[in-house]
Amino acid sequence: MTQGDFNDTTRMLIDIQKDVSATKTKVEDIEDKLNQVDEIDGKADKALAKSIEVEHEVSRVTGVNGTSIRKVAVGRRISEV
């Protein structure tokens, strides 16, 4: 092996090492982003569950409010008689 071949091989190995290092960094960034997506997905699921819970509560309160209004209206009619 001549000195030129050694230098070419060394440069090629250094380039491969740089490429592997850059690829590793990109993979780590992708893993971080996937972890963030999982975390956001979990938060979205919790928010959806809460919104459904609030929707049911609003429906219940609306029903109670309607019943109260009807009772007041009936009470007024009775007191007017």
Image (tube, helix red, strand yellow):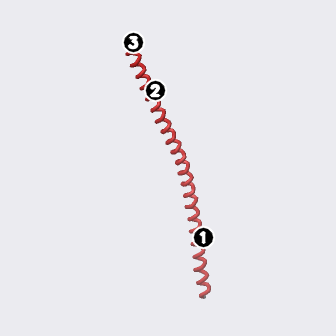
Query: Dot 3: within a 10 Å radius of its alpha carbon, few (fewer than 14), some, or many (20 or more) residues?
Result: few
Q: Nearer the viewer, residue 40 or 21?
A: 21
Residue type, numbered disc 3: Thr
| Comparing labels 2 and 1, the label whose residue is closer to the camera | 2
Mark count: 3
Quadrant (top left/top right/bottom left/bottom right) for the N terminus:
top left
Residue type, numbered disc 1: Val
Q: Please identify the residue farthest to the bottom as the structure is shown.
A: 81
Relative to 80, is 37 above or below?
Answer: above
Q: Secondary structure at mark 1?
A: helix
Question: Which one is earlier in the sequence, the residue at label 3 or at label 1?
Answer: 3
Examine the image and state in which quarter residue 58 appears.
Answer: bottom right
Q: Position of residue 44 (x, y in %)?
A: 53, 51
**Is 50 on the left or on the right of 10, as rendered?**
right
Separation (CA) of disc 2 from disc 1: 70 Å
Q: Position of residue 57 (x, y in %)?
A: 59, 63
Question: Which one is earlier in the sequence, the residue at label 2 or at label 3?
Answer: 3
| Comparing labels 3 and 1, the label whose residue is closer to the camera | 3
Separation (CA) of disc 3 from disc 1: 93 Å
Q: Specify the label residue 2 is tagged with.
A: 3
Query: Dot 2: within a 10 Å radius of its alpha carbon, few (fewer than 14), some, or many (20 or more) residues?
Result: few
Q: Position of residue 67 (x, y in %)?
A: 59, 73
Q: Which residue is under mark 2?
A: 17
Q: Which residue is under mark 1?
A: 64
Question: Which one is earlier in the sequence, the residue at label 2 or at label 1?
Answer: 2
Relative to 32, is 47 above or below?
Answer: below
Residue type, numbered disc 2: Gln
